[in-house]
Image (cartoon, rainbow, N blue to C red):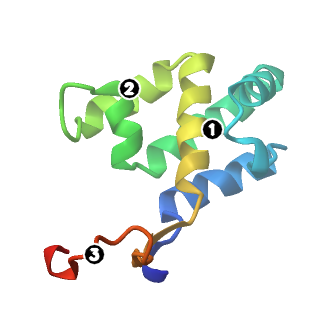
């Protein structure tokens, strides 16, 4: 097996995760929609505003794609407006996407070695 590339966490996701940690979120559980929705419901207006501001300051194409499905990148001015008007369910989905972006992704390739029992008697055909 050979490691081809390692894709680190995005800077935007790290910045949003820092805000969420300050508000009492467990970053290990950001993939759980129920957990995130429950935490958002427990926040006061000031806390929700901080979450929204974090998403506005840390724009990422993956977040914009949620609001603009027909456009490849979306529009920045409309994104700000959509975040401010977003329901708790939409914010929960964006936080879940943020949790995915916090994962380090490693891409691996491996060689497949044919064993003798799978090879035909005529090795030239391989």
Q: Which residue is mark 3?
A: 121
Q: Which residue is mark 2?
A: 81
Q: CA distance from mark 3 to mark 2?
A: 68 Å
Residue 94: percent from left, percent from top: 53, 34
Secondary structure state at the residue bearing disc 2: helix
Residue at position x 59%, y 59% in the image: 103
Q: CA distance from mark 2 to mark 1?
A: 14 Å
Residue 99: percent from left, percent from top: 61, 47
Closer to the observer: label 1 or label 3?
Answer: 3
Q: Earlier in the sequence, mark 2 or mark 1?
A: 1
Residue farthest left in this picture: 125
Q: CA distance from mark 1 to mark 3?
A: 65 Å
The C terminus: image quadrant: bottom left
Mark 3 burial class by Cα count in 10 Å: few <14, some 14-19, many 20+: few
Residue farthest front in this picture: 121
Q: Earlier in the sequence, mark 3 or mark 2?
A: 2
Residue at position x 67%, y 39% in the image: 31
Q: How many marks?
A: 3
Examine the image and state in which quarter residue 30 appears: top right
Secondary structure state at the residue bearing disc 1: helix
Q: Which residue is mark 1?
A: 51
């Amino acid at each position: 097996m050979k490691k081809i590339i390692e894709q680190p966490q995005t800077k935007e996701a790290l910045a949003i995760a820092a805000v969420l940690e300050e508000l009492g979120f467990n970053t290990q559980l950001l993939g759980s929609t129920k957990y995130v929705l429950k935490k958002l419901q427990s926040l006061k207006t000031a806390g929700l505003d901080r979450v929204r501001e974090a998403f506005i300051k840390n724009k990422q194409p993956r977040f914009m794609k949620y609001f603009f499905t027909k456009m490849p990148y979306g529009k920045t001015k409309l994104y700000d407006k959509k975040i401010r008007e977003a329901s708790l369910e939409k914010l929960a989905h964006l936080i879940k996407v943020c949790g995915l972006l916090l994962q380090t992704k490693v891409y691996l390739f491996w060689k497949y070695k044919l064993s003798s029992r799978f090879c035909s008697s005529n090795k030239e055909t391989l």
